[in-house]
């Protein structure tokens, strides 16, 4: 008999030993096996195989089934999983499990081909593109950033650098923030590389994912495309990792392990002496700071390459307006439609209206399971919670005081759709948001119709803001720019700035007269002003100074430890225990560089009937921060009904 040590994808961070008969079963390190675990059979990952019988006080159970004939994970994967385990505070089994994309970890998106991107035309490079390609290829530095305005041809630079790496016999991983963009790229890359392109993401079936995984392992693939989890692709000769739209939040996992694909990509680049090439028109503040310090090499693309010019951006103060579409936006929409061009309207809130209130007593209709206002969906005649999915019927009488002096305030995409249909009865209008996107194939059809010019006005949420390339759009209207600005989070200004720049980038990509109308109740807000005037460098300098003064990333590192459970008193009690452990850790380690900056209810205090409290740790040195967090984690005794979530380098504190 032989013996195998395995780990399982559970929070239990330990190895388990099983036995197997080598004449009947071939268990190799890196393979998956099925083993009895308690009262059930589970999938486990084999980490060591030995002929030496371990000393145990109990009889060993046998491996039931060997799932993989060849190892699924390489030595590099196991080393990488070990780093993820230590850095992001998860078990080794959870880290290995995260490497295989699953439907639980990345939301499935529609297939949306980008005809402009996929067309096999000969492209003449601009001087800035040529210079960036040459500098990246010839540099011995590992980390590079392509900082270019929207429409400046970043994708072509990515392609050319990838071609150079592939010509050297090495493999490329190309990450995009959403699965939608995976399919756009796939068409373009298949024109260049034929079948030597693989796709890895959660939209694939399990058998298809495994087939692609094996193709990559056997070096039958030159380039791997995918969303976040494709960073773990089993390339045997990795030469380049591309992270497109690096600023996007979707690169950060929302479940354990809460890894950031950018950080994992940096780790893999160092492990393989491969280059990491990131790119965006709006870099994250962390990446911008690294560029300023020189740890990441910056390559600039300051001009658009398709004949278009940067659009003229106009800010409208909505305090002076009486309707949801300002007079100027209405006038510009009329003029655009008369010219035969198209309009995109952006509003980052779906539904009809999102605030039911009673004027008599001040009652607000809040989700009974979450501390979030319910949103009125007129077409479904229901009030909906966009966090847990709770629905109820709208009311016309206050449930608290029986007053009829009640109303709905605020507006979502459904109300805007009704308004523009009323004002532009001849226009062909389509709405693109998560409500529409639930219908299979609908997202792709809406975008294809807009690309073909069969739609005049496209109204949508963030779905219309990312990576889409429309030739005939010369007006973008941002119906309300204040959604992200009002969030109680230290990244609110950064998110607002990024979103405005990205949405504005859909206008005038191929035309010289692009316009953007930004409607806001905070026209003086710096993030809105800087985005509108193109003062990008000023925004980053100002925001970095603010972060430095207030002690937030990138100058300080954070760990957010969240306590959640259905018993509020228990949550408060356990949060206090965690605070005591943190103070003890800081004292015992003699490390005053780590500080506790907040022990309180989360800004969103309740989600899906779970109360939420958190403790935030801060330090300028991530090593010290991890030491304190590790002490807390190992010293804490778990309590029934209470769940602890550790988020290293959180993207938000909500």
Image (cartoon, rainbow, N blue to C red):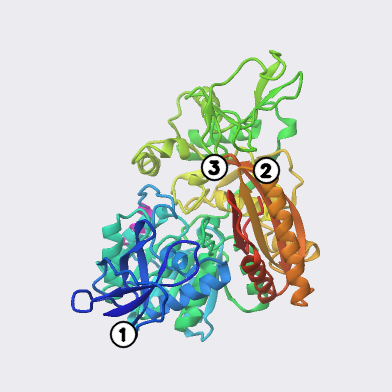
Relative height, residue 183 to residue 230 (above, below): above
How packed mark 2 is, by other alpha carbons closer than 10 Å (few <14, some 14-19, many 20 or more), is some
Give the mark nearest the N terminus, 2 or 1: 1
Give the mark nearest the N terminus, 3 or 2: 3
Relative height, residue 160 to residue 180 (above, below): below
Q: Is residue 568 left or right of residue 57?
A: right
Give the mark nearest the N terminus, 1 or 3: 1
Q: Relative to the observer, which residue lies in front, 621 or 273?
A: 621
Residue 430: name its quadrant.
Answer: top left
Q: Is residue 522 left or right of residue 211?
A: right
**Nearer the viewer's eye, disc 3 or disc 2?**
2
> Where residue 125 sits: x, y (%)?
44, 70
Asked if the residue at tag 3 contacts the one at tag 1, i.e. Cβ–Cβ closer than 8 Å, the answer is no
Q: Relative to the observer, which residue lies in front, 642 or 523?
A: 642
Relative height, residue 199 to residue 48 (above, below): above
Residue 568's disc is 2
Asked if the residue at tag 1 contacts the one at tag 2, i.e. Cβ–Cβ closer than 8 Å, the answer is no
Indicate whether residue 214 is drawn in magenta: no
Label 3 – label 2 distance at C-alpha: 49 Å
Which residue range is magenta in the image? 114-120
Label 1 – label 3 distance at C-alpha: 70 Å
Give the residue number, with chain letter if any, for mark 1: 51
Residue 124 in sight here: yes
> Where residue 5 sits: x, y (%)?
38, 75
Q: Secondary structure at mark 3?
A: strand
Given the current orientation, which residue lies at the most extreme left position? 23
Give the residue number, with chain letter if any, for mark 3: 475
Q: Residue at x 26, y 80 (%)?
A: 1
Label 2 – label 1 distance at C-alpha: 51 Å
How packed mark 3 is, by other alpha carbons closer than 10 Å (few <14, some 14-19, many 20 or more), is many
Residue 603 in sight here: no
């Amino acid at each position: 008999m032989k013996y195998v040590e395995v780990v399982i994808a559970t929070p239990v961070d330990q190895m388990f030993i099983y036995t197997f008969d080598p004449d009947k079963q071939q268990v190799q390190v890196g393979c998956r096996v099925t083993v009895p675990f308690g009262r059930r059979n589970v999938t486990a990952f084999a980490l060591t195989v030995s002929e030496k019988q371990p000393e145990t006080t109990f009889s060993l159970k046998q491996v039931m089934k060997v799932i993989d004939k060849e190892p699924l994970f390489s030595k590099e994967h196991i080393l990488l999983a070990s780093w993820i385990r230590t850095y992001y505070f998860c078990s080794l089994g959870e880290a290995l499990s995260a490497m295989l994309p699953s439907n639980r970890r990345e939301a499935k998106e529609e297939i949306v081909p980008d005809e402009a991107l996929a067309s096999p035309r000969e492209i003449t490079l601009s001087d800035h593109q040529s210079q960036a390609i040459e500098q990246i290829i010839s540099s011995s530095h590992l980390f590079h950033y392509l900082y270019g305005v929207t429409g400046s041809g970043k994708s072509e630079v990515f392609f050319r650098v990838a071609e150079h790496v592939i010509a050297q016999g090495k493999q490329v991983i190309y990450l995009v923030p959403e699965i939608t963009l995976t399919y756009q790229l796939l068409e373009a890359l298949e024109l260049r590389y034929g079948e030597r392109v693989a796709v890895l993401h959660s939209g694939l079936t399990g058998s298809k994912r495994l087939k692609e995984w094996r193709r990559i392992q056997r070096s039958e693939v030159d380039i791997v495309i995918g969303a976040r989890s494709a960073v773990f692709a089993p390339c045997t000769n990795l030469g380049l990792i591309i992270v497109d739209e690096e600023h996007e939040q979707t690169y950060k996992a929302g479940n354990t392990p809460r890894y950031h694909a950018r950080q994992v990509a940096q780790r893999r680049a160092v492990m393989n002496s491969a280059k990491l090439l990131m790119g965006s028109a709006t870099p994250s503040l962390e990446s911008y700071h690294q560029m300023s310090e020189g740890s990441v090499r910056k390559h600039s693309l300051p001009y658009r390459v398709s004949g278009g010019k940067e659009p003229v951006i106009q800010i409208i103060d909505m305090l002076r307006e009486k309707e949801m579409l300002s007079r100027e936006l209405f006038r510009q929409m009329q003029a655009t439609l008369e010219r035969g061009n198209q309009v995109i309207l952006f509003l980052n809130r779906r539904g009809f209206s999102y605030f039911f209130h009673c004027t008599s007593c001040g009652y607000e209709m809040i989700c009974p399971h979450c501390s979030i206002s319910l949103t009125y969906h007129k077409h479904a005649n229901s009030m909906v919670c966009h966090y847990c999915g709770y629905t109820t019927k709208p009311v016309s009488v206050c449930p608290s005081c029986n007053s009829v002096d009640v109303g709905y305030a605020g507006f979502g995409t459904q109300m805007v759709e009704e308004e523009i249909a009323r004002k532009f009865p001849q226009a062909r209008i389509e709405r693109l948001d998560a409500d529409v996107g639930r219908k299979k194939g609908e997202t792709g059809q809406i975008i294809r119709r807009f690309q073909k010019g069969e739609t005049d006005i496209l109204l949508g949420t963030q779905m219309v803001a990312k990576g889409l390339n429309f030739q005939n759009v010369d007006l973008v209207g941002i119906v309300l720019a204040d959604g992200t600005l009002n969030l109680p989070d230290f990244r609110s200004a950064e998110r607002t700035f990024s979103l405005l720049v990205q949405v504005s980038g859909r206008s005038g990509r191929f035309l010289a007269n692009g316009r953007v109308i930004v409607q806001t109740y905070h026209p003086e807000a710096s993030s809105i002003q800087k985005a509108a005037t193109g003062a990008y460098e000023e925004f980053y300098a100002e925001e970095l100074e603010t972060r430095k003064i207030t002690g937030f990333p990138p100058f300080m590192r954070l760990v957010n430890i969240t306590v959640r459970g259905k018993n509020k008193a228990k949550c408060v009690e356990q949060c206090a225990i965690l605070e005591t452990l943190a103070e003890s850790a800081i004292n015992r380690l003699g490390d005053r560089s780590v500080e506790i900056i907040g022990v309180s209810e989360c800004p969103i205090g309740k989600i899906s009937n779970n109360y939420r409290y958190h403790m935030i740790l801060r330090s300028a040195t991530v090593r010290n921060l991890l030491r304190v967090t590790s002490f807390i984690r190992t010293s804490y005794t778990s309590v029934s009904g209470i769940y602890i979530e550790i988020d290293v380098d959180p993207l938000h504190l909500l």
